[in-house]
Image: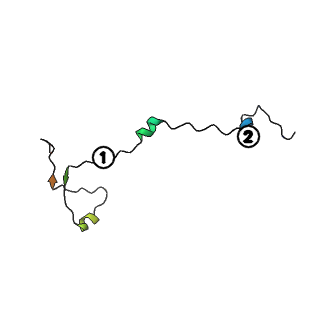
């Protein structure tokens, strides 16, 4: 029989109704993954352009002028 519906099928009414909307994202999970920029300044140093061009990830750069924070270095 053409045009008949079998209501025993789990998705029988899917042709009439849109799928249920996705659950909204968990606000706590979204907040936990929010990036927060942080700046740590413990001193300054000067590099030439040639030295700066040679810097790669993992390099250690010596700090020549330290900033004192109250009694702490």
Which quarter of the figure has residue 9? top right
Give the residue at the far top of this rendering: 8
Give the residue at the far left of this rendering: 71
Q: Are marks 2 and 1 in contact (CB under 8 Å)?
A: no
- Please tell me which residue lies in front, 23 or 8: 23
Q: Residue 12, position in %: x, y?
A: 75, 36
Tell me, what colour scheme is on the image?
rainbow
Q: Residue 37, position in %: x, y?
A: 33, 47
How much space separates mark 2 and mark 1, taking CA atoms?
51 Å
State the mark number for residue 19.
Answer: none
Q: Quadrant of the C terminus?
A: top left
Which quarter of the figure has residue 3? top right
How packed mark 2 is, by other alpha carbons closer than 10 Å (few <14, some 14-19, many 20 or more), is few
Q: Residue at x 38, y 45 (%)?
A: 35
Q: Residue 13, position in %: x, y?
A: 73, 36
State the mark number for residue 38.
Answer: 1
Give the residue at the far bottom of this rendering: 50
Q: Residue at x 41, y 38 (%)?
A: 32
Q: Residue 67, position in %: x, y?
A: 16, 49
Q: Residue at x 25, y 67 (%)?
A: 49
The local secondary structure at tag 1 comes to loop
Instruction: Identify residue for label 2.
Output: 15
State which tag comes first along the sequence, 2 or 1: 2
Q: Is residue 53 above or below residue 62?
A: below
Give the residue at the far front of this rendering: 17
Q: Is residue 24 left or right of residue 2?
A: left
């Amino acid at each position: 029989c053409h045009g008949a519906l079998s209501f025993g099928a789990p998705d029988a009414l899917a042709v009439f109704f849109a799928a249920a909307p996705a659950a909204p994202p968990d606000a706590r999970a979204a907040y936990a993954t929010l990036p927060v920029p942080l700046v740590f300044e413990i001193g300054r140093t000067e590099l030439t352009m040639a030295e700066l061009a040679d810097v790669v990830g993992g390099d250690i750069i010596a700090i020549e002028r330290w900033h004192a924070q109250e009694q702490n270095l």
